[in-house]
Amino acid sequence: MANFIDIHTRTGQSQPKHYKTTLFRGDALMLGMNCLESGQEQAVHTHRDQDKFYLVIEGRGTFTIGTEEQEVGPGTAVWAPRGVEHGVRNDAAVQLVLFMGIAPAPAKKRTGEPG
Amino acid sequence: MANFIDIHTRTGQSQPKHYKTTLFRGDALMLGMNCLESGQEQAVHTHRDQDKFYLVIEGRGTFTIGTEEQEVGPGTAVWAPRGVEHGVRNDAAVQLVLFMGIAPAPAKKRTGEPG
């Protein structure tokens, strides 16, 4: 597996569900990209045993973390610790590109998609 | 603890050792910033039980991962899985700003500094 990836080469589009791809996977950590077209969302959900983060790379995301909702743009890191519900939707006109990670890494899905 | 942090507000400078700060810490994952001035380096080292990544935010970094060395710039994610030696130096003229994470989170240091 490559140890160096230009994340801008790993964006994509998907309908109806948003695009996800894995960049790196170890036992302790999985990293990936989530790309949400305008109007797409990742529904609010909770990982009971995993800490998760997003870093906004392009666009703007409206994130729910617990009872808090914030719309943020490039350079904002968003923290969703284990047991705290979280989700994101793209209310903006342009694509939302997120670098994300989850620890420990989830069980491998056949599709290799991150959670 | 805040769940939203603009990472550009968490850069800094330190001498002689490079600047480190923690953004978020859970049991499974710690996220932080590493800022290396021109000429500074994080010496090659190994985490036996932790997966680690860097994402270059600004500047250029010369990374060693195992036997591989590469100089990369903004948008490149660098993967240092458990047991693989890794380090980075700033051979460029401008500051190198890295977003980084390590999983599981290291034992808490008194200084709160990331590994």
Image (cartoon, coloured by chain):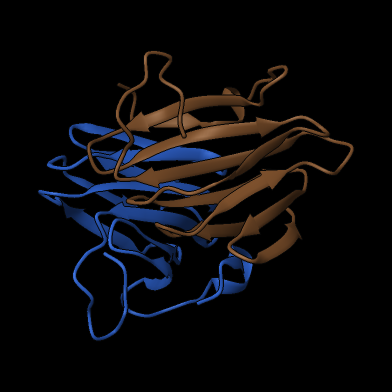
Chain colours: A blue, B brown
Viewer-closest of B100 and B51: B51
At horizontal 33% and vertical 38% (from top left) the residue drawn is A79
Residue B32 in the image: state x and y as whole percent.
48, 34
Residue B12 in the image: state x and y as whole percent.
65, 21
Total numbered circles: 0
Which quarter of the picture shows residue A115? bottom left
At horizontal 67% and vertical 23% (from top left) the residue drawn is B17
In this rendering, position of residue A40 left or right of residue B43: left
Q: Residue furthest top?
A: B110
Q: Residue furthest bottom?
A: A110
At horizontal 41% and vertical 71% (from top left) the residue drawn is A22
At horizontal 74% and vertical 57% (from top left) the residue drawn is B72
Viewer-closest of B79 and A13: B79
Which quarter of the picture shows residue B110? top left
Residue B43 in the image: state x and y as whole percent.
64, 40
Q: Residue furthest right?
A: B93
Viewer-closest of A58 and B70: B70
In this rendering, position of residue A94 left or right of residue B58: left
Residue A89 in the image: state x and y as whole percent.
34, 54
Query: Would residue A14 be seen by someone viewing this image from the given angle?
Result: yes
Query: Would residue B74 be seen by someone viewing this image from the given angle?
Result: no
Query: Is A49 located above or below residue A113 in the figure?
Result: above
